Amino acid sequence: QLNVEICDVTLRDGEQTPGVSFTCQEKVNIARKLDEIGVEVIEAGFPNISEQERACVKTVKGLGLDARICCLARAVREDVDAAIDCDVDLVSIFFATSDLHIRIKYKKSREEMLEQALGMVDYAVDHGLNVRFSAEEGSRTDTEFLKEMFRQGAERKAAYSSFADTVGCMTPLEIFNIVTELKAGLKNPLCVHCHNDMGFASANTFTAAQAGAFQLHTTVNGIGERAGNASLEEVLVALRMKNGIERYDLTKLQEISKMVEEYSGIKVAKTKAVVGEHAFAHESGIHIAAILEDPATYEYFMPEMVGGERHFVLGKHTGRKALAHVVSTLGCELSPAESDWVLEQIKERSAGKCSITPEMLLNLIKRSKECA
Ligand code: HCA
């Protein structure tokens, strides 16, 4: 089995989704649900951005959850002071390590930035904090510099080194290779933080774990800046299905997904893996006929595993068996001629892009008795 832990960053990076701002009560509800699922670390916020944010990180820390509470800090004194004030279990001290970011944002040399960041690692460690030493832009950073940064961070007692694919520019093979290389000389556990700009965030996160990354960053529904982050639900399902990791309570995944959808106002795509409305919906008559015999024919994992339900949808591809099944769930029965007539009506309506509601079906069943 892979040796991993989850650090869910919904309450911090997830809240950096344009237009998203959670109330403190919403953060508390999400944190409790993450804790019930068994997530090991919850990144609760960025306490130096406002008094309310700081107060809320303290509130989340004060809940006494099993999960450890983490917060974000730039490599500057006031951010680390805010983390100390919140008494978090882990502080992520980050700076952007790529030459592009160092030139544009900091206007300092790499060495000067590293010195400043290491000074903040020392400062946090001296104040009793566990530190995650985080390379924002790790994926576009000179590998030798990254190794040197992580080597020095570990020497200064950073508990973790963290690699961020900040602009989501990596493919699974690339992340496998870089994680393998970084891991080789590393004295502390490696974290990965993957963005979704090419749609690879969850795949990259899981692949990084296969290459030896320990702490995996996720957000519920994959929300986050731009195209978002790795999805908690996708990563946890992959850990269960591909690695047999049983300790997370996946039955709460649909519940937490709906909670975050409501609080964030960011609608989950119907086709989203694991939690989308269509994740366990079937329309094809061929598929439904097989599923009625054995759901494993067209479902890799069962909806119950993630707190979901299977749905059969009637439409253009519906066959006789599927129709008979759906009709029987409404307590009705159709003769072969009635069934053919209803099928014809369904196909006609779905060609007009009209979806078939249960009421519509009941009406068709009734009319079939007169028309067929
Ligand atoms: C950001 C920082 C970060 C990384 C944080 C971390 C990123 O740009 O907001 O590594 O802990 O995406 O690079 O979220």
Image: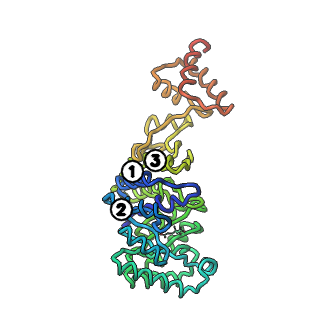
x and y percentages locating residue 45 in the rendered image: 45, 63
Residue 58 position (above or below residue 355): below
Q: Are marks 1 and 2 in contact (CB under 8 Å)?
A: no
Whether ligand 1 has any atom under 8 Å from the Cβ at mark 1 is answered as: no
Between marks 1 and 3, how big is the CA–CA gap? 15 Å
Label number found at residue 259: 3
- Furthest-top residue in this view: 370
Which residue position holds label 2? Answer: 61
What kind of element bears circle 1?
Answer: helix
* Residue visible at 51% across and 62% down in the picture: 13
In the foreground, 271 or 6: 6
Q: Is residue 212 visible?
A: no
Between marks 2 and 3, how big is the CA–CA gap? 20 Å
The crowding category of the residue bearing disc 3, from other C-alpha atoms within 10 Å (few below 14, some 14 to 19, many at least 20), is some
Inspect the image, locate mark 2, and give the three-letter code of the amino acid beneath it: Lys
Residue 346 position by quadrant: top right
Q: Which one is in front in this view, the residue at disc 1 or the one at disc 3? A: 3
In the foreground, 148 or 296: 148
Label number found at residue 250: 1
Q: Which one is in front in this view, the residue at disc 2 or the one at disc 3? A: 2
x and y percentages locating residue 109 in the rendered image: 58, 86
Residue 284 position by quadrant: top right
Inspect the image, locate mark 3, and give the three-letter code of the amino acid beneath it: Met
* Residue visible at 44% across and 57% down in the picture: 238
